[in-house]
Image (tube, rainbow, N blue to C red):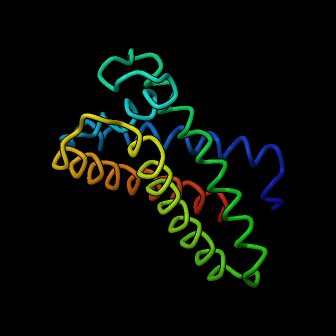
Amino acid sequence: MELLHPLVVFVAAVFGLIATTIMDFAMDRLPEGRMPPAIAAAAVSGNKPEDVERGPVVLAHYGSGTVAGVVYLGVFALLSMIVPDSTTMSLLALAGAGTIMFGLMIGVFFLGPLSHVGGLTAQRVGDIKRSWMISAGVYVITVGICMLLFVQA
């Protein structure tokens, strides 16, 4: 299977959208689960997170989640070129892509939008980071499962 074929890229975007939707279930159960998308939208709009309307928050959340699905595919495709072609190595490439994506999602959010938001206590920043790490973990696991089922089909 050609991993960077336009149809496969589209499927990866859909997987990103699905993973973002699943991630929402985790976010709804976390104390600061809804704050990371608001912070990301605030960073783009220049507003405070609590002042950003719901529309831009949803757009930032689902837009970045969809794009992240394509990035996951790109990382997986790159790792697949490095490791020998076998089922075990495909699983290793998927696990590696998930690990890299988790690091990217955490790093980009912590060093980007979160670092530019003022007025948050250290305790609240810690809660937001914890909520984001759990949410990102749910996302990466979901995309990984979708990709695994897709490449094994």
Foreground: 34 or 83? 34
Foreground: 100 or 93? 100
Which residue is at 29% across, 44% downward?
26
126 versus 44 height, above or below: below
Q: Quadrant of residue 146?
A: bottom right
Report whether 125 appears left or right of 109: left
Which residue is at 44% across, 50% downward?
139
Which residue is at 53% across, 40% downward?
65
- x, y percentage for residue 27? 30, 40
102 versus 39 height, above or below: below
Q: Quarter of the image containing the C terminus?
A: bottom right
Report whether 78 appears left or right of 97: right
- x, y percentage for residue 87? 66, 79
Which residue is at 79% across, 43% downward?
7
Foreground: 123 or 37? 123
Q: Quarter of the image containing the N terminus?
A: bottom right
- x, y percentage for residue 38? 37, 29
